[in-house]
Image (spheres, coloured by chain):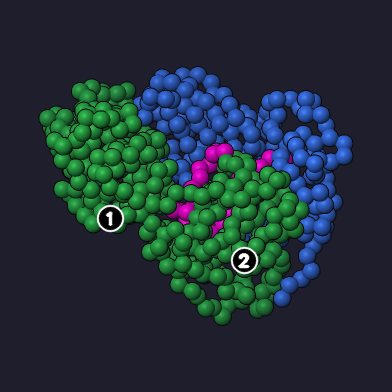
Amino acid sequence: MKKPLQWTSAALLVGVVGACGGGGSTTREAPPNPTPTSAIPTSSPPSGPVLPTDLSTVPSATSGDIDEDTGGTIAPQPAPTWDEQARHNANEAAEAAMTAFARPFLDYPTWWADLSPLLTQQAQQDYAYVDPANVPAHGVVGDARITDQTSAYVASVTVPTDVGPYLVVVTRADATAGWLVASLTPPEGVK
Amino acid sequence: MSNRKAGVGIGCAAFVAVPVLIVAPITGFLLLFGPNANASCNPEAGTVSSVTIEPASVPQNKIGNYGHEQLVNAAYVIQAGKDLGLGVRDQTIGVMTAMGESGLRVIDYGDAAGPDSRGLFQQRANGAWGSYADRMNPYISATNYFKALMKVQDRESLEPTIIAHRTQRNADPNHYTRYWDSAVAVVEGLSGIDTGLATGTGNQVCASTGTTPGQVSTTGWAVPAKGPITSPFGYRIHPITGVRKLHAGTDLSGGGCEGPIWAAQSGVVTFVGFDSGGNGTMTIDHGGGVQTKYLHEYASGMLVSEGQQVKAGDQIGRVGSSGGSTGCHLHFSVYLNNKPVDPVPFMQGLGITLGS
C-alpha cells in the first residue's frame, strides 16, 4: 500500500541548485550563470557537490513526515549555518570539555560525571576507560580557536593547554542543538 | 516485500545471518541482532594463531625503524603473549602498545602524565604493575600488560587501539592506531609467518579484511553499496493502525552482512552512533545543504569518526542489521536542506544507478 509521493518541496529543491551550484562546481553540470570562483572568500565553506540538473523530478519528503526507520519527525529543525553565535558556542563547548578533561587530580567518578555530559555518544564510549591520573594536561591556558568549519555541523577547535594545543572536534545535530565533543587529541609527542 | 534480504558475510566468513521470515507489515520493526554483533573476521583467538620467536634468535637487521635492541624487546612481548595462551592479534596489540609507550625501548624515565612511568609499557608505580624491577623487565612487564589486557571483555569486537587503551587507561583512546602497521610488520618479520592481519586496521574491529575503494563516477559521486534494491523510498500506511510513515531512503542488499559501504560523496562525518531506535547511523555532510546517511551498521561496522574527512568511494562501513532491520542491508538516505529525497532518481541524475 503506497500513497502517491509528495511533490511540494520541488520548488525548494530547485532553489538549492541555484544557491549552491555556482561556487564549487567544476563540471559541465554547472548552472548557466556561475559565480566566478575568485569571488568566493577563501574562508567560506565549500558550496557543495554537483547536484542533478533536474531536481524537480526527484520526490522529496515533507516536513512533519514520520521516518519509518528512526521513528523521528522529518526536519523538525532548520539546517544549521555558521554565524557569530555558532562560532562562540562551538569554542565554548570545546573549552568547557577541555577544562573538565584536564583535571588529573580528580577521582574518576567526579571527573567522569563532569566530562561525560559534554561528549557525543561515540566519545562517551571511547573516553569512559580513561584514568584521569593519566591525562597529561592540567588546564586550559588560552582562548579556544576554530581551525576548521568546513561543515556547519562540525568544527575543529584548537584549545591551548599547559602541555600544548589540543585539537577538539565538536559536532551538533541541528541548528538548535548544543555542541558536543567528539574527540580531544593531544599535541604531537603527548599521549 | 518486508523480507529484506539476509545473507552471508563476504569478508568475514564465520558471520552468518539467519534468514528471517516474518508475517509482519512493512513497517514491522524487529530487533534481532544487538548493536555489537560479534565480527568474527579476525585470526582465531588463543594458541591456534599464536606466533613464536626466541629473543636470542632475533636477527641483526632492522624492521622499519626498529633496530636489534627494539626487536629483541618485541620478541619478549610476543613470547609473553604466547606463554599466556594469547593469539596473534593480542600479541600484535602488545607490540603496538609498547611501540606507542616507549618506542620498544626499556626506558628508565616517565612522561608529563606519569613521571613515575617506567619500561616498555610505561607502567606506573601505583602497585598495579609490580615492582620497579618488574616494570623494567621486558618479559615480566609484558606479562603484566597481557594479564590486564585479558580482562578486557569481548576483544574480538573491539579495535586494537581501544583494547590497548582499555588496558593502559591512557588519555587518548586513539593513540596506538598509528603504531599498528609497524607492529604487524615486526610480528610478521620476526616470526616469518603471514599472520592474516591487515595493515590499516589499528582502529577497526576486523583486522583480517582491509577496506576496498568503491566506484566513483565522473560527477564525483560514488555507489554507496552493492545492489539489488530491496525496498524503495516512499510512503507506507500501516494496514492496521493507519499511520502513514516515510521510508526515507533506499534499501540496498549491499552484498549481505559485512559487505562494504562507501561514502557517496566527499565530505565531513558529522554523526556516528545509534539513534533512539537503535539504528547504527553514519552521517556525512557534503556541503551546500547536502547530507547522506547510512543506517543499520553494528558498532563494529562503523569505520569512521565524527569530524573525519572522507572522499567519495572511501569504504566507511560494513553492512549490518541493527535497529529497525530484519536482515543485513544498507538503508541509504540523501538529505537536501535537512529533508530526505528519493536516492534513486537523485543518484541517477549523477550517473549512478542504485541497485545495479
Task: Inspect this view and state whether residue B35 appears.
Answer: no
Q: Is residue B285 magenta?
A: yes
Q: Is residue B323 magenta?
A: no
Give the secondary structure at mark 1: loop
Given residues A88 and A42, the one toward you in this image is A42
Residue B228: which numbered mark, if any? Answer: 2
Colour of chain B in the image:
green
Looking at the image, which residue is at 19% across and 52% down? Answer: B85
Give the percent coordinates (x, y) of residue A34. 84, 35
Give the percent coordinates (x, y) of residue B55. 16, 37
Q: Which residues are magenta?
A: B283-309
Q: Which residue is mark 1?
A: B45
Screen quadrant of the C terminus of chain A: top left
Tell me if mark 1 has few (under 14), some (14-19) or many (20+) residues whose alpha carbon lies within 10 angstroms of its own.
some
- Up-down: is B83 above or below A130? below
Tag 2: amino acid: Pro
